[in-house]
Amino acid sequence: MLRKPVFFVGFMGAGKTSVVRRLARIAGSASVDMDRYIERRCERKIAEIFAEEGEAGFRKVETEVLRELAAAGPQFISCGGGVVVTPENREILKRSGFVVHLQITAHDAAKRIRNFERRPLFGDLDNAERICEERGPLYEEVADYTVRTADRSTGSVAYELRSVLRRKGVLWLRKSS
Ligand SMILES: Nc1ncnc2c1ncn2[C@@H]1O[C@H](COP(=O)(O)OP(=O)(O)OP(=O)(O)O)[C@@H](O)[C@H]1O
Ligand SMILES: O=C(O)C1=C[C@@H](O)[C@@H](O)[C@H](O)C1
Ligand SMILES: [Mg+2]
């Protein structure tokens, strides 16, 4: 059982969506992916929201959704890669739960990402490296725990986090699990 919301932040391709899906399964808790939630709410793909309303329009919905999810009770929440760029979002993250930073370099992320549709800001590698560097301190500002995910499987990161969250009293498990 989760005691509070656990938010996952980190650069595009760090593995937030994949790790949260796995962790939710092995910890027996609910999970939600902010990007998918936004797409359902707006009945449009992320790329369409960016094309029609610009980054500012997307960030506005992102903050509304984060506020809503932060108040929705304990679950695992994979955030969009840029959630930390909005100061209000950083405050919500810091006060509402436990925050895990999945860390990766732009170079390693580029090797993994297949679907660039959902990530219109990734751009070319130089651009991604610049954004990744700018955001590094913001991810660290909100993080309660950081894990590097390059050269690791989703499962190994998920099992490490399950034990970290137990140790920190954020996750309670029945003895058999
Ligand atoms: N540990 C891993 N090793 C190799 N590939 C991985 C790993 N974790 C995720 N991937 C792959 O990398 C891609 C990006 O992963 P994922 O969508 O989970 O990242 P994300 O952090 O949610 O990105 P975004 O912020 O853009 O939503 C996916 O194709 C996924 O299958
Ligand atoms: O890093 C970012 O700014 C983004 C990452 C994706 O998860 C999406 O939330 C969107 O493409 C913006
Ligand atoms: Mg994701």
Image (cartoon, rainbow, N blue to C red):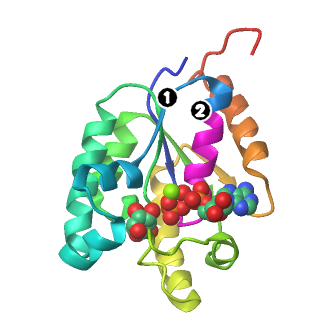
Confirm whether the magenta stretch covers residue 23.
yes
Characterize the magenta stretch by its predominant secondary structure: helix
Please name the residue shown 75% across and 38% down the image: 160
- Number of marks in the image? 2
Position of residue 127 measured from the top left corner of the image (x, y, whole percent): 50, 88
**In what quadrant of the picture does the C terminus appear?**
top right
Q: Amino acid at mark 2?
A: Ala
Front-most of residues 161 and 17 = 17
Q: Quick one: label 2, few (<14), some, or many (20+) residues within 10 Å?
A: some
10 relative to 108, above or below? above
Horizontal side, residue 37 vs residue 24: left or right: left
Front-most of residues 22 and 106 = 22
Of the numbered discs in the image, which one, if any, rests on residue 24? 2
9 relative to 86, above or below? above
Of the numbered discs in the image, which one, if any, rests on residue 30? 1
Q: Quick one: label 1, few (<14), some, or many (20+) residues within 10 Å?
A: some
Q: Is residue 59 visible?
A: yes
Q: Earlier in the sequence, mark 1 or mark 2?
A: 2
Q: Are marks 1 and 2 in contact (CB under 8 Å)?
A: yes
Position of residue 36 measured from the top left corner of the image (x, y, whole percent): 40, 52
Outermost residue toward the top? 175
Classify residue 86 by image quadrant: bottom left
Look at the numbered disc 2 and give the secondary structure of its residue. helix
Classify residue 61 by image quadrant: bottom left
Confirm whether the magenta stretch covers residue 44.
no
Look at the numbered disc 1 and give the secondary structure of its residue. loop
Which contiguous range is marked in magenta? 10-24
